[in-house]
Image: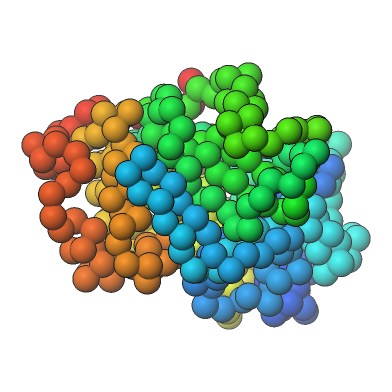
């Protein structure tokens, strides 16, 4: 085998793969990077959001991707309405695609690339081309997580153009005053301009089944409830994300990557176990990869496994809360868990979303009478609550 034509092959140009590519381009410009994306543009059609408090390093990589920013946000529940002051930001796939094309040479960006075979040091495409690489990082997402159980966060969102201003000056991150269907349901609203708003209907559900037509109608119903007249739908996105309650990390890792390739994003289990939130984790991981002294296939694969294993270890508290949410609460009563959570101090909420809850935070979250039946809560913590879904099964 001759010398590799590229140093790092990144499979998948979504959020995780895109951030890895941008981090290498900025901090290791000497490396030859290639990003393989099956679609025609990087990122697809997505909006990703984050709290300013999530980011400790690497904010300069996100800055060109930000499409909107707000000084705070709002949550709404049947028994609670609260305005919080943590700055909130949204980035879009359009900006991710533009930034990747600015930061990397055209030869490094392969769209419409359908991958048929992968090894730790090579990528083969459907058109017959094979690329040799020093290391391969697979960031193509995961349709399921084998050897793990939990529930699903599923959503459908639409960017709407309104005929009259909507009147919002900040996002509604959770509006759970809507009728509860199929588990914990809330609407998410991002006001991108006076006439443009992104509405997403989201569910914490036991099944991954996604009824797109029903969700479209519920978005239309919500807009009508708020008195908003929709001129047109600019674009639509939908997804089903795992919410992790328990599992066997080592079995998961070896089942999904027996060939020793590096892995990132959901394919490596790098999501917040309860919120399915991934942006701050993806950024931290991308920056970590840039610090590696050795970038051989073996070294990258080992580094990905070690980082993901540590992330799994650090997620025990959040997985316990997931078990309580799915295993102890009746589907139409799950909103009470989040309603209570949003009565806690704002710094605690910030650390929770960033995945940096300290021991005092954990005690505060668990203190007092739980918003679910005590017996069910204890049973779920012990793994004896309602049966949870196998996350490797999307059927």
| Percent coordinates x, y for residue 4 in the rendering | 76, 63
Residue visible at 74% across and 60% down? 67
Q: Quadrant of residue 383?
A: top left
Residue visible at 62% across and 71% down? 295
Among all residues in the image, which is located at the extreme right? 106
Q: Is residue 13 above or below residue 124?
A: below
**Residue 258 appearing in the image:** no
Residue visible at 37% across and 71% down? 347
How many numbered tags mark residues here? Answer: 0
Residue visible at 77% across and 42% down? 164
> Which quadrant is home to the N terminus?
bottom right
Q: Please name whichever residue, 275 or 5, is drawn nearer the observer in this view of the structure.
A: 275
Q: Please name whichever residue, 143 or 297, is drawn nearer the observer in this view of the structure.
A: 143
| Percent coordinates x, y for residue 289 in the rendering | 58, 71
**Residue 60 appearing in the image:** yes
- Identify the image's colour scheme: rainbow, by chain, secondary structure or one colour: rainbow
Q: Quadrant of residue 70?
A: bottom right
Among all residues in the image, which is located at the extreme left? 375
In-image side of 130 versus 211 (left or right): right
Q: Is residue 15 above or below residue 59?
A: above
In-image side of 135 versus 256 (left or right): right
Q: Is residue 211 above or below residue 165?
A: above
| Percent coordinates x, y for residue 173 in the rendering | 51, 51
In-image side of 216 versus 266 (left or right): right
In-image side of 272 versus 278 (left or right): left
| Percent coordinates x, y for residue 375 in the rendering | 8, 37
């Amino acid at each position: 085998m001759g010398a590799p034509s590229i140093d790092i092959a990144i499979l998948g140009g979504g959020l995780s793969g895109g951030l890895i590519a941008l981090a290498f381009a900025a901090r290791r410009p000497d490396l030859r990077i290639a990003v393989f994306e099956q679609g025609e543009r990087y990122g697809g059609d997505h909006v990703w959001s984050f709290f300013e408090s999530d980011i400790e390093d690497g904010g300069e990589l996100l800055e060109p991707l930000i499409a909107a920013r707000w000084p705070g946000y709002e949550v709404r529940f049947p028994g609670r309405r609260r305005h919080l002051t943590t700055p909130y930001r949204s980035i879009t796939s359009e900006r991710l695609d533009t930034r990747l094309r600015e930061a990397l040479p055209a030869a490094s960006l392969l769209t419409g690339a359908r991958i048929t075979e992968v090894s730790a040091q090579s990528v083969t495409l459907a058109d017959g081309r094979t690329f040799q690489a020093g290391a391969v990082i697979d960031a193509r997402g995961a349709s399921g997580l084998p050897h793990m159980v939990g529930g699903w966060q599923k959503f459908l969102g639409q960017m709407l153009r309104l005929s009259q201003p909507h009147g919002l000056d900040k996002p509604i991150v959770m509006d759970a005053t809507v009728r509860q269907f199929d588990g914990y349901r809330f609407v998410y609203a991002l006001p991108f301009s006076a006439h443009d708003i992104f509405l997403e209907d989201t569910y914490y559900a036991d099944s991954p089944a996604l009824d797109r037509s029903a969700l479209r109608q519920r978005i239309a119903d919500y807009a009508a409830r708020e008195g908003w007249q929709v001129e047109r739908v600019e674009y639509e996105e939908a997804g089903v994300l795992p919410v992790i309650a328990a599992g066997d990390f080592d079995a998961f890792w070896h089942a999904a990557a027996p060939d020793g390739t590096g892995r990132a994003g959901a394919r490596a289990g790098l999501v917040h176990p309860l919120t399915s939130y991934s942006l701050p984790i993806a950024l931290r991981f991308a920056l970590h990869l840039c610090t590696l002294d050795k970038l051989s296939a073996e070294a990258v694969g080992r580094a990905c496994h070690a980082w993901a294993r540590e992330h799994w270890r650090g997620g025990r508290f959040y997985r316990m809360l997931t078990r309580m949410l799915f295993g102890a609460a009746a589907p139409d009563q799950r909103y009470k868990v989040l309603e209570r959570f949003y009565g806690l101090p704002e710094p605690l909420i910030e650390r929770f979303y960033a995945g940096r809850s300290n021991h005092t935070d954990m005690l505060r979250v668990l203190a007092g009478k739980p918003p679910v039946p005590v017996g069910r809560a204890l049973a779920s913590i012990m793994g004896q609550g309602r049966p949870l879904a196998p996350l490797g099964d999307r059927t």
